[in-house]
Image (tube, rainbow, N blue to C red):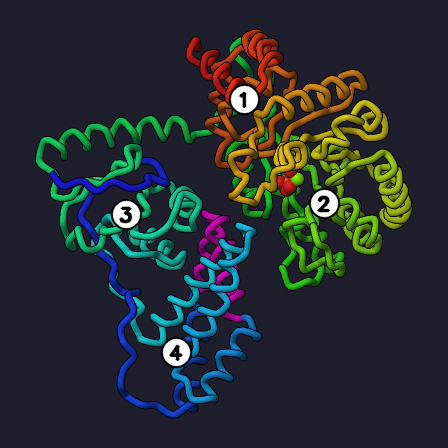
Amino acid sequence: MPRLHAIGSSTGIAIGRAYVMTNHQRREESAVERTPEAELAEFRAAKGRIEQELTRVAQRARQNSPTLASIVETHAMIVSDPIVANDIENRIGRGESAVDAVNSEFGKQVRLMMLSTNSLIRDRATDLEHVQEHLIAELQSLTTTDTMQEPMIVVAKTLTPADMYRVAQQGALGFLVEEGGVDSHISIIARDLGLPAIVSLRTAVASISAGANVIIDAYGGFCIFDPTQTELDEYRHRLEKDRARLSRERTPIQGVIATSDGTEIHVLANVDTPQAAQLAHEYQAHGIGLVRTEMMLSGDGSFPTGLQQQQWYASILNCCSRGSVTFRAFDIGGDKFGSYSPYTEQNPVLGLRGIRFLLAQPRIFEEQVKAILRVAQSGRTKLMLPMITSYAEIIAAREIIDACKVEIEDERNMLIDLPVGVMIETPAAAVMSDVLSQYVDFISIGTNDLTQYTLAADRTNELVSNMFDCIHPSVIRLMRMIVDASSAHNIDISVCGEMAAQLTATDVLLGIGLRQLSVTPHVIPELQRRIQHISIERCEKLVTELVDCRTSQDVRAKIIEHQAQD
Ligand code: PEP
Ligand code: MG
């Protein structure tokens, strides 16, 4: 029966009837002439409706999908941006229709962003395009209000986050979408919702008629429409097996997690929001190994007050009933929250980022440290410094922390225990880790930046994405140095970069001596299972064999060979 092949960007199988969404296709502007005042009123009303809808969607999404919530919040910010709205209103004032004004203004911004060499900025362009489509659909009253009468497979040209959330609530079984790539919002949200998706399926809407029977096989990257009875039977059987497997694999394991030869491993969580901390708790995380506190910032250049910060930190601490919570001081600069930096930098990734920014702006650093000290719970709260490259930075930061501690101990009338650690995420810190280990209470390896700076490959630049590889022998050699330094000085060590979430790298991490891995909460159940399956003895043997590897390909081949013997 007919099959369409494209990219299976969120795995799984789905069987159902097609719900074809054509609502967001543009139609020609109506010939009816309206006054600028009427167009302006129309634009403002449409903008207001979208703002309300996005706020509602973000609130609901926060409960089960932090990624979706943050995307919707970004869209809400774009819609509410006074500069964009002002430019659109000026165009309308000059006689353009509301639809033309929205298209021209957004079109201009999108074109500029698409010219950027920075992939983060190009991704923002997709956000703008989605908001543009949403506004146009609203202005043309094309927003769909019909609902699915039964759980169905959604077929669409494109989908906004709000569309996805709405159809997921109505029981969507999976997505077949003409646009999008593996890392597009559609794919990220589908993965977050745990629904299969095939994207870049160019002819989906034209080929699949509403109500047709469809099978999605996102493992194979294809869909079958109008399947035969034999195909239906086969896929029903596969779907049942798949559901049983997923429910086993997505259920976190309670209690101690140990390798097959009995070494206990702590699986912690990286969290960016209090909602993610709640998820970490549900996934049985053995504590929180990294809180990216900069994620609390609204993005408008202003900092939360000390009191607002305290509430945010306390809500994360309160979610975590097990282990400790490591708050990383604001990691501002580089590709993160550039608008917060008062400095103009040619090359911000090598500029005033992380601890350098905090030492240049000591008031911001002090305010944050004091807020953490005010809510710190003994033995449960830790402070971590980002982007360290030198001993001098640690000493300077500790002086500030110590002064804050004296003040808050006085205020709380008690001694406060706040271990201070550092991220080792630059080659300079890795090479000096034997020295740095003597001045801190713990270290955590940030493999994202360690890979970026070691291999001189921008982590956000698609042009060098093939070079950005955390299992490159040079990164592994540096990691071994760091682990050796921490054990020589008997301090706690963990890894909190993405490498910890890559199951192909677990054997390497355990083999070089790491016993604490901090990952995004969703990965915890799979990682727990991987750990239980492997033995430290074999992981150590693998690592001794990696010494001779010259390239990432050599390392990967060794890992595959090793795992094939499992
Ligand atoms: C890292 O660099 O590995 C890390 C965990 O920090 P971030 O990704 O926030 O830079
Ligand atoms: Mg980092």
Confirm whether residue 356 shows in the render: yes
**Mark 1 or 4 closer to N-term?**
4
Whether the residue under disc 3 has CB within 8 Å of ligand 1:
no
| Label 2 – label 1 distance at C-alpha | 30 Å
Q: For the residues carrying marks 3 and 2, which lies nearer the camera in this image?
A: 2
| Residue at 33 percent of width and 56 percent of height | 158
Q: Which residue is mark 3?
A: 201
Range shown magenta: 54-80
Secondary structure at numbered mark 1: helix
Q: Which residue is mark 1?
A: 506
291 with respect to 397 (left or right): left
| Label 1 – label 3 distance at C-alpha | 34 Å
| Residue at 51 percent of width and 58 percent of height | 115
Q: Which residue is mark 2?
A: 350
Identify residue type, mark 2: Leu
Identify residue type, mark 1: Thr
In magenta stretch: residue 69: yes
